[in-house]
Image (cartoon, grey):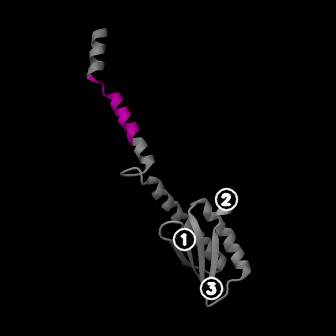
Amino acid sequence: MTNDDEVTIEFKGRHDHISERMQEHAAKKLDKLGRYNDRIARIEVVADHAHESPEVELIVHMRRGKPLIAKDQGKTFAATIDLLVAKMEKQLKKAKEILKDHKIPGGKEGSAKPEKAKAKKKAAAEETYEEVVRKTLRG
């Protein structure tokens, strides 16, 4: 991602304040999400009781389409953020795969190639009428 496409990260605390140290850790982890999808516009981190068994919700707003949401509860804020980043990576990868695969009817690009290779092998194994006639005429 270029500097022009900086992703804004918003922190919201319910019933508690999210400290600067927590925000820095979360921002460091969330910056890595840009690798998986370049359409991320904004990320919201909503933490409920951030200091004692926090319940954290991660909302990734895309430039187009619905936002992706991941929610989890852990022992510490940092551990919960790590879990949510892993969950969001999976969602972003899946969303990008769906965008890539929309042009091919009936499946992914990778699955279409082996079928073509099998069809070529099968065609090579079966002789055509012309090939049989050529062989018989040659000898």
Which residue is at 61% across, 62% downward?
Answer: 34
Residue 122, x across and y down, in percent: 34, 33
Distance from the alpha carbon under mark 2 to that under mark 3: 29 Å
**Precedes in sequence: disc 1 or disc 3:** 3
Amino acid at circle 1: His
Q: Look at label 3 and name its amino acid.
A: Gly
Look at the numbered disc 3 and give the secondary structure of its residue.
strand
Say whether disc 2 or disc 3 marks the residue closer to the N-terminus.
2
Mark 2: few/some/many CA within 10 Å (<14, 14-19, 20+): few
| Circle 2/circle 1 CB separation < 8 Å | no
Q: Amino acid at mark 2?
A: Thr
**Which residue is located at x 40 percent, y 50 percent?**
104
Q: Between marks 1 and 3, how big is the CA–CA gap? A: 18 Å
Q: CA distance from mark 2 to mark 1?
A: 18 Å
Mark 1 residue element? strand
Q: Which residues are magenta?
A: 115-128
Magenta span: chief secondary structure = helix
